[in-house]
Image (tube, coloured by chain):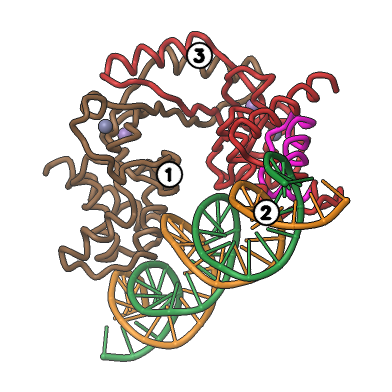
Chain colours: A brown, B red, C green, D orange
Amino acid sequence: MKIADEHITLFKSALKQASLRITSQRMAILEEILHSDQHRECDDIYSSLRAKHVSVSRATVYRTLDLLEQVGFVRKMDIGDGRFRYENKLKQPHHDHIICLQCGKIVEFIDPHIEQRQATISKDHGFELLRHNHQLFGLCERCRDGETVPSKGTDA
Amino acid sequence: MKIADEHITLFKSALKQASLRITSQRMAILEEILHSDQHRECDDIYSSLRAKHVSVSRATVYRTLDLLEQVGFVRKMDIGDGRFRYENKLKQPHHDHIICLQCGKIVEFIDPHIEQRQATISKDHGFELLRHNHQLFGLCERCRDGETVPSKGTDA
DNA sequence: TTTTTAATGAGAATGAGTCTCAATAAGGAA
DNA sequence: TTCCTTATTGAGACTCATTCTCATTAAAAA
Ligand SMILES: [Mn+2]
Ligand SMILES: [Mn+2]
Ligand SMILES: [Zn+2]
Ligand SMILES: [Zn+2]
């Protein structure tokens, strides 16, 4: 957990620098994100913490996730099903997602070609590109082979 | 209004074929979409119709928009601000959008290059690509030049 | 410790979209 | 035209993720 420890220290510094307080809830939420390589939704994080007997409320999870996004520790993503997902941004460079409409499986991809075209297209239309949303929806191999049951993964 | 009339006839046929009824509400909503080249949100359509003294409810606007999407007359799009937009799909081929974060301006684009890469990427990951979401967010020229006031366009 | 004030938690509020169900109105039959 | 069946509508209740409120709690500076 070397690198996670560094991130924890970094977060504490960021808090102090902004004269925000280091609370047990904030640290627990941070660690929950750091120790997961998945795309987590708020209620999922909330439940995990409660299961570990961490005293925290949904409101605090939402607030802390927003804070973590602001300081650049977390990426907030919208896959169009009405619930935001959060992922550790510190160790992963920018990427986009392919999402299985049946089982909810999420695969990450990055395509320099596409990134380049986005920049060019924006410029061509006089826009200063600040960010983008790009997700591909379809059926993963297992779902096409009927090896899965329709789950609550994504109904978007 | 030649082409719009054709579309109206087409819609009536589609309704009959599905033994659905041709109602004044459905026709009014269809025309509202046909006579607009913008990306409209439900409540916007609802208000326009009421202003024209069309007797209709929000529920019916939502229901009819869904119906129009199902028969392929309308494209439902999610620009990530919590409200769906609808646009006339009949005359426009597939395209994606660039959205100004300040004034809400929406510019359309299509890039065969990107479309091709999406297909390849999906295949590479074993996915059957069914649809995609792709939007670029930034500042349009006028907003960069300070010629606009921050509006309710998009706060995503 | 004491003090100051940021942070938290419980639950109310929000808001887009959906659902319910009694009332209404297409449209086929006669 | 009138009648009859049944799809459609409208008002408002409901959903559900997220935000907000505000009294209570607890960092951390003094
Ligand atoms: Mn990811
Ligand atoms: Mn468009
Ligand atoms: Zn799948
Ligand atoms: Zn603009």
Query: Looking at the image, is mark 2 or mark 3 nearer the viewer?
Result: 2
Q: Is residue A137 magenta?
A: no
Quarter of the C terminus of chain A within the rendering: top left
Checking the image for residue A81, the label placed there is 1
Write down the chain letter for disc 2: B
Please determine whether, in this image, residue A89 is positioned above or below residue C20: above
> In the picture provided, is B96 more to the left or to the right than B44?
left
State whether label 1 is within 8 Å of ligand 3. no
Quarter of the N terminus of chain A within the rendering: top left
Residue at (39%, 42%) from the top-left corner? A155
Per the model, the C-alpha gap separating discs 3 and 1 is 27 Å
Residue D15 at x, y = what percent?
44, 62
Residue A144 at x, y = what percent?
26, 25
Identify the mark nearer the N-term, 3 or 1.
1
Residue B19 at x, y = what percent?
61, 37
Residue at (23%, 50%) from the top-left corner? A8
| Amino acid found under the numbered disc labelled 3 | Arg
Per the model, the C-alpha gap separating discs 2 and 3 is 40 Å
Segment tinted magenta in the rendering: B25-47
> In the picture provided, is B123 more to the left or to the right than B11?
left
Q: Quadrant of residue A18?
A: bottom left
Checking the image for residue A117, the label placed there is 3
Q: Are marks 3 and 1 on the same chain?
A: yes
Q: Are marks 2 and 3 on the same chain?
A: no
The residue pinned by badge 2 equals B58
Query: Looking at the image, is mark 2 or mark 1 nearer the viewer?
Result: 2
Predominant SS of the magenta segment: helix
| Amino acid found under the numbered disc labelled 2 | Arg
Residue at (17%, 40%) from the top-left corner? A3
Secondary structure of the residue carrying tag 1 is loop
Determine the quadrant in which ligand 2 lies: top right
Per the model, the C-alpha gap separating discs 2 and 1 is 22 Å
